[in-house]
Amino acid sequence: MNRRTFLQLATGSLSISLLPRGRAASSGSPKAGQIKAVAFDALTTFDPRNVDRVAEELFPSRGAQFANLWRTRQFEYSWLRVITGRFTDFWSITHDALQFTAAALKLELNDSQEEKLANAYLELQPYSDSVAAFRALHEKGIRLRFLTNFSPNMLQPIVAKAGLAPYIEPHLTTDLAHTYKPDPRAYQLGVDAFGFSKEEILFAAFASWDANGGKSFGYPTFWVNRWDVPADSLGTEPDQTGNTLLPLVEFVTARNL
């Protein structure tokens, strides 16, 4: 497996054709201890394939390739900025990665196309199970927040349009810590905001590397493996895995009995 393929798998972006199959959570008993809050990565809840659609519209037959490289470069840039101590917000990284992608694929990208592609992130739709899962957790008294690399201007419009606002508390974006996941300072935002111990906060990850990061930090972790990609071999495993948020609700319910 080459480096590019590995990174695509790690970010959950190898192929838009890997659709969730509704698989229930993997077997195994949850560890003891009640869950009082859940911190979600944004892509556990919002489907990024709108970006692929816009890319295909602008670059016919190249859309999937464009979107996959763009997503991969977004995360590469965020990790490199943490390592080098040169933080900039994720919206800026999104634009930088977009320009790189066009150059790498030798595609002309004018200002109008760049704006349309970037704004596709502001139009992400929730997965069909997302709103029901948030509602169910809220009704159980579980406190909910997003803990994501997305900048506030990326997260606020999609949350409002999805109707999730009544169920969640103010967002935790890594902008607040001037870093990105999997830096422990990013995961610490959840502890500071909720005021609970790590063991009382479930972290819901979209990407395997993020599930590893949350688990290494000390959170009980649920990997929402929407696209059924292989797990990374990074020395830790999530407490549970499922293809949607509904097994996550079941996991929290069972843990809190």
Image (cartoon, rainbow, N blue to C red):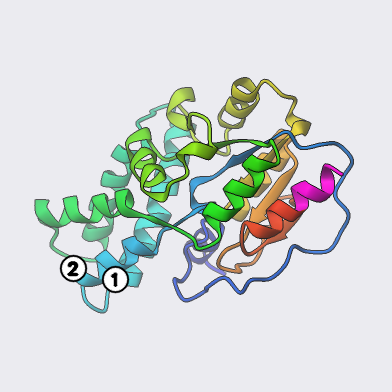
Q: Quadrant of the C terminus?
A: top right
Q: Main secondary structure of the magenta part?
A: helix
| Image quarter hosting the N terminus | bottom right
Residue 78 placement (x, y as % from top left): 43, 40
Return the x and y of residue 46 as percentages of the image width and height: 46, 54
Dot 2 and dot 1 residues touching (CB under 8 Å): yes
Q: Earlier in the sequence, mark 2 or mark 1?
A: 2
Image side of residue 85 versus residue 33, left or right: left
Q: Nearer the viewer, residue 103 or 165?
A: 165
Q: Which residue is mark 1?
A: 63
150 is higher (above) or lower (below) than 86: below
User: Compared with residue 213, is residue 111 higher up or lower down, i.e. above or below?
Assistant: below
What range of the chain is rendered magenta? 251-257
The residue located at (78%, 64%) in the rendering is 26
Whether 239 is drawn above or below 155: the answer is below
> Image quadrant of residue 129?
bottom right
Q: Residues within 10 Å of mark 2 (few under 14, many from 20)?
A: some
Confirm whether the magenta stretch covers residue 43.
no
Q: Residue furthest front?
A: 139
What residue is shown with label 2?
58
